[in-house]
Amino acid sequence: MMFFTRTGHRIWLTVLAIAGIAIVGSQTNFLESSSHREAPNILNDPLADNTDVYAFRNPTDPSRMVIIANYIPFQLPQAGPYYYDFSEDVMYDIHIKNNPATKGDDIIYRFDFSKTDEDPTTFFNIRLGKENQKVTYNVMKSTDNGRSFTTILSNAVVPPPNQGPRTITDAVGLNSNYHQESLIEGIQRLSTGEKIFVGPVDDPFFIDVGAFFDLGNLRPENAVDGLKCKNVHTIAMNIPIDVLQKDGRHPDDAKSILDSDYVIGVWASASRPKITVREKNGKISTNGPLVQVSRLGMPLTNEVIIPIGRKDEWNAMTPYEEKGTFDKYFTNPELALYIDNTAYGDAVPQLGMLPLQTNSLGQFDFRNSQDGLYPLLHTDAVKGTALDPALFGNYLLRPNQPRSVDILPLFMTGVPNLPPYQLATGKNGNPLAKGKPFVNNFLPVFGDMLRVNMATPHTERDSPDFSRLGLVQAAVLGLTDPRFNQNTDWDFIPNMDGFPNGRRLEDDVTDIEVMAVSGVVLAAIGLWYDDYIPGSPNPVTPDLLTVLNFTDGVDKNDAPFLLGFPYMAKPWSGLEGGTCDCGDNGMPEMQNIQGLHLNMTPPSNTADKIETYPNPASKSTTLRFNLVNETALTLKVYDAAGRLVATPMEGKKHKAGVHELKLDVSKLGKGMYYATMQDKDGKKQTVKIIVAE
């Protein structure tokens, strides 16, 4: 135990090490998801299947939280004639826990859906302004753990599926603009303070699904996003923080950026009536009490951590019923066996290349079934820390369950702002000493939830510090960046608001969780990898860099997010979906190339792509776009070889609003062309145009 009594050198890093970390941290990327087709029973009921839960401080209005629950995985955009939608027989709930002193949920938002056919004489989903399977919904709210509900929204309309340009924009269809009228006008503003959007969106999950579930056969140099060009149905809520905080307090009233009173737990579920009756005439009736069939809090819990024999059991249980039932899968996670080369790491080389602490600081082994920090229980070394038996030591330190000290609290309780859960900065070599605070989302309710501290400020999305690695990157900056590593003061370190302190759309939860299983959290608090030399001023060892450079190869979403609520990208259309089928060689380029920066939508939203119709075209095609501000535009057309073939417009002023430009393509030969629109500031958008005979 000499290590904990001697005084070590103050941690400092060489320029080379800082540069190595900076390379990792500079990868500013986008989004992720977690629970697609994760349990045997829910495979037969996709309309009730949770896919993701997100909770993050609103980046455009920090007085609010954005909470998102997604359902219905792997939606093909071209799924006609009957498209995916919420079920009339399912109750979709978003659960909030904000007070550990109460039993069960403190707030529940319940969504109930209905469908009507406006024109049952046609087989089309939409025709001549009428919509079949038109979906409306009611929202109910409970503040007494579901014993009673109050209706706060009635008969709101769910935007239709984005079937394609003729269905949406032409007079033979809805004669509307999908982005403006469906996404933006679909936002409901409630008298109780909440804003709600419900409807189809691009699935924000990104991961090389095929490779990961081929027994970890990752291919980072040639990865394929298994969710690319797939849609999902979302329930997105934009809620004032004082509605969610247990005492109704505004975030400006927080005592610190890690104020424990602002921690909430979020989870979502889907429930069906217990009895389903199928009649001979094709009708189906349901009755009986609601039975939970799916749930989701922390990403990847049921998909990766819970074994297949217990996945359905986990889905049917609330967090308040767990009571340690599944703890052993967190304290000895299966994934760690494939990182450990003394177990099965050699059989899964892409994961086996990752290190795991087997002799950290010359004493501590965190491989499955080893003791980890358990030998410290009941010693003077842990007094006053979270590992003290007078606090949480008996929960966090368990014999032969080494990850009870890091993986278990990440998922089941949140992490307190107590030693040892502070950065190694300022600890002078003793991981149990006080260090630099960087997280507090501790909510002592023992069950799986996505926990987030609403007092923690948000990181600007356009900041050079913003990172897909969330709290991992906050730790990197807190250890290495001179702006933060010179003291143990309370500082806001960029990405302290990232996963697992909540979950932003851009957070790469797959990579973060693999890093966590590989021991990166242990390293952040001073339990370094085996190649660290005690007393060395540089803990950024090759092993640590190996972990921080890990990627499955898919690091961002397939479409840019909106800059305003509901933040997700609009759904892929049925016409686009036909060009997005993927295989081992990746996906062909989409029909319309997404643009980012032409300022082409209402101020609260991201730039929409240029819409073109018809496309393919033989004589002419129309370009439709929306401008926020007046600007001068230039349009140039290039052939597939990149040669300029036409300049239909040069420096022409356009006022704010929706515009359409008819483009003559009759003199162009058959083939593929690219139309590039540029504003006066040099910002561009490009769209592909196919000219047919």
Image: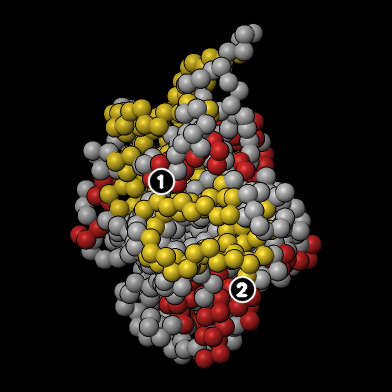
Label 1 sits on a secondary structure element that is: helix
Q: Nearer the viewer, residue 198 or 211?
A: 198
Residue 404 x %, y %: 53, 58
The amino acid marked with disc number 1 is: Gln
As drawn, the residue found furthest toward the front would be 667
Q: Which residue is mark 1?
A: 180
Q: Is residue 582 visible?
A: yes
As drawn, the residue found furthest toward the right would be 347
Q: Nearer the viewer, residue 676 or 230?
A: 676
Label placed on residue 101? none
Label 2 sits on a secondary structure element that is: loop
**Residue sitting at x 79%, y 62%:** 347
Residue 425 x %, y %: 42, 80
**Residue sitting at x 44%, y 34%:** 158
As drawn, the residue found furthest toward the top would be 280
Q: Is residue 563 visible?
A: no
Q: Is residue 575 above or below residue 374?
A: above
Q: Nearer the viewer, residue 187 or 275?
A: 187
**Residue sitting at x 59%, y 50%:** 620
Query: Distance between the Cα atoms at labels 2 and 1?
Result: 40 Å
Label placed on residue 549? 2
For marks 2 and 1 on the same chain, the one whose residue lies earlier in the sequence: 1
The amino acid marked with disc number 2 is: Asn
Residue 131 x %, y %: 49, 27
Are there few (<14), some (14-19), or many (20+) residues within 10 Å of tag 1?
some
Residue 424 x %, y %: 45, 78
Q: Is residue 234 above or below residue 590?
A: above
